[in-house]
Image (spheres, coloured by chain):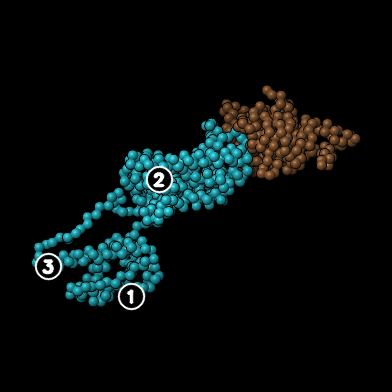
Amino acid sequence: MHSEAVTVTDLVKRFGDFTAVDHVTFTVRAGEIFGFLGPNGAGKSTTIRMLCGIITPTSGSGHVAGFDLFRQPERIKESIGYMSQKFSLYPDLTPMENIRFYLGIYAVPPSSWKARTEWVIRATRLESVRHRLTRDLPPGWRQRLALGCALLHRPRLLFLDEPTSGVDPITRRHFWEFIRQLTEEGVTVFVTTHYMDEARHCDRIVMIDAGKIAAIGKPSEIIQKTLPDRPGADLQEAFVALMRGRP
Amino acid sequence: MSLKKIGAIARKEYYHLIRDFRSLYLAFFIPLLLILLFGYALSLDVDRIPTAVVDHSKTPESRDFIERLNASLYFDVVAYPVSTEKMTRLIDGNRVVVGIVIPPDWTARLKAEKDAPLQVIIDGSDPNYAGNTRAYLMAVVGERNQNRLLTFLNRRGREPIAVPVEARIRVWFNEALESKNFIVPGIIAIIIMIVGALLTSLVIAREYENGTMETIRSLPVRASEFFFGKALCYWFITLVDVLVAVLMGQVLFGVVMKSNFWLMILASMIYISVALSLGLLISVKTRSQLMANQMAILLTYLPSLLLSDFVFPQQNMPAVLKAVTFAVPATYYIDILNGLYLRHLDFFQMWENFAVLAVMAGILFFLNIRALKKAGL
């Protein structure tokens, strides 16, 4: 097993004239929660979609879960879990049917379908609504189901794109507890968010702005390095200071 | 390619279908409606032509003429207006298509062995119908003249003579010249296009509109697995529709297939594949259900109806349009069905049609895979 779950070097993605991701280099170590922070439009989603094998980078190089970003996107998709705020489950299917679909697509052996389904339904607290149509569930519940579906094939690496946006604070707290639990089982989590306060849940973070990395490291290190004379400062202030410091 | 993944997608499609009222309606109600509509209402046969006769002569001979006319299957004398003006009004009002005026001196002239003209007015709005009407009327009058001529000659003491030239016509394939024998195969082709292409044109567009295409792209699904998973459900539904259409053709209209049933199933399977591939290709290209639906009607349903030799004969089309008909899959399928239904042909007499359809299916499959790969699968 690689000690690095993700390594990317000089990753670039251009859409026509627009450079969404501009020479990004970082590594994610196995077993950590890695946060990808930045304002909307900074290139977070584009990066995560490249890492998940959904779009091909313009240039650079990288490996995810030991597979090459350019040559083995299918293998990457098989071995990771990906959940995005942007995409949805099938609204006219019940949670059980959605789960069944994912089990088939992830080629989970049918012998373990029952156990996996029960585990996911329990972990995401969806016991009471398993046979209701997904469209009738509250957004927070749908999100939990989406997370559960992304975990059905027991991926060692989980990508979460804005998993908590538009979710109430209590659900967010539950969510982070659940993520922490997963990492204790050895799962590596890569998460993007535009909530600066969520960085405290992360072991290490990257701060990205306009497609470029502004800072990388432990949250406390970043604050200390950016604002050495203000010990009580938070990440939000550090980020603003970083932005101001740019030419 | 994994069968399990195809199965998972097909299963999901099945749930979509049974929970979507519109699709179900399109899949089962429209075919039934079409068969009934085309089979009963939209007959292409010209018979029981509504006719009005103004009989100024009022003699046994004139009444006999009217009776003969009425007795034939082709004319239905529905009105006996007293004047030509009244008859004109019936034609204007679309109540009758033919108006016949028998002059007062008609019988007298006949008896005097002079020429005895009948005035006939035909509504020519529908030239095809009017042409048939004229031909039928000429035949009725011609027969009457022939009989008169023969009795006249025989009365003159000559030996009984026969008609000099007589065309002994035998109609092949569709002996009774009934259009339903020809319509049923055409309907089957149209239904496959409606159910196959119209229905599938929605399915990928729907994924785009629901945002689930992004989900699919993030999953380990190959373009071919996605394609087959999507098509599977609809393939079987369309095949069921074909069987229903064949059965209804037989039970309701007495149209019986003369040739091999399994050959018909084989042709249908290939043609269904063509229709589904067309629908899916439109769907992945347009990415919107509304657009896809309109494109599907324009590119699949209308050409199948208008250019396939079903409604309008291809022989009469200008060269440019004739060239277009070669690209319409229904042309080949209807040709096969006519061969099977009416001509009792076997596979080796029609293999070119099968081959063309199979090649079309192959090309469309390739185009689908390319489009899906471009869409990020």
In the image: residue B212, left or right of residue A225: left
Badge 2 vs badge 3, beta-carbon distance below 8 Å: no
Q: Chain of mark 2?
A: B
In the image: residue A22, left or right of residue B84: right
Q: Kindly state the secondary structure of the residue where label 2 is placed.
A: helix
Chain A appears what colour?
brown
What is the quadrant of residue A18 in the picture? top right
Q: Amino acid at mark 3?
A: Arg
Which of the pair B9/B224 is nearer the observer? B224
Mark seen at residue B84: 1
Q: Earlier in the sequence, mark 2 or mark 1?
A: 1
Q: Chain of mark 3?
A: B
Which residue is rendered at x = 53% and y = 36% of the image?
A: B224
Mark seen at residue B155: 3
Mark seen at residue B333: 2
Q: Amino acid at mark 1?
A: Thr
